[in-house]
Image (cartoon, rainbow, N blue to C red):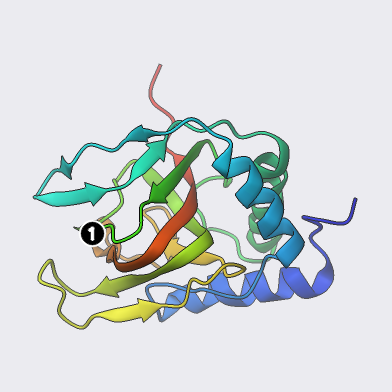
Amino acid sequence: MHDFHLEKNRMHVFKTAVLSLRDANFASPLFFTKTEINLLCREARALPFRQAQPSLGKNVFQDFSICFPAPIKNSFKRAAQMLEQACQSIAREHQNLFESEVKINDFAVQNYPADSRGIGIHKDGLRYRNLVFILTLDGQSDLFVCSDRYGTDRQIVPDEPGRLVILPAPGLAYLGQADERPLHGVDNVVGGRLSIGFRQQQDQPA
């Protein structure tokens, strides 16, 4: 089985992308193969979804259905393990880049209908650490980052299927202050959007 194999060239692409976060608030390298995307897409569409809460804090609208927590198994597990392995490799070369070993323990799948409003401008929660990974599996839309909740300095993030969007999160050495985590949102959904998110949720005290 050749899918989700962290070969040398792919590791180089991942490392370059993560290290670029020193000077940028996102990276989106071409990373996954068409075969891998097809596997992930098929498994994602088979999951049970529920309608997301229409609004979420600070008037952030949500117009999609969601599977959360989604099971990290099969192709999802192999993809997550590959990302963890890549992070571990970088951490061996760049000590103190991450506040802790990157372990993906939070997984969501979002299914936006055709002509969805998307999701409003927001920051990922403080509980998410080190890196946030977003992968679009199908559809067309605009994922963007901006400098404030009015959408100033809007910048489109290339996220067509095959690209791995990487956002910095608290715990990454390049993110000076936790409040500097990037504002982002999704709009201009054409024909729907299916995406997944891999995150590391901070361990809760016993």
> In the picture, which quadrant includes the C terminus?
top left
Query: Image point 61% across, 34% down: which residue?
Result: 72
Query: Image point 19% across, 75% down: which residue?
Result: 147
**Residue 24 % position (x, y):** 40, 79
Query: Image point 29% across, 65% down: which residue?
Result: 182
Please indicate whether residue 60 sits to the left or right of residue 14 in the image.
left
Please indicate whether residue 152 sits to the left or right of residue 48 in the image.
left
User: Taking 64 as reference, is 46 above or below it?
Assistant: above
User: Taking 181 as reference, is 75 above or below it?
Assistant: above
Please indicate whether residue 206 sits to the left or right of residue 88 in the image.
left
- Residue 101 sits in which quadrant? top right
Residue 85 in sight in this render: no
Question: Label 1 crowding class (10 Å Cα cut-off): few <14, some 14-19, many 20+?
Answer: some
**Residue 176 % position (x, y):** 31, 66
**Residue 76 % position (x, y):** 65, 43
Q: Residue under label 1, please give it.
A: 117
- Residue 43 sits in which quadrant? top right
Q: What secondary structure is found at the residue carrying circle 1?
A: loop
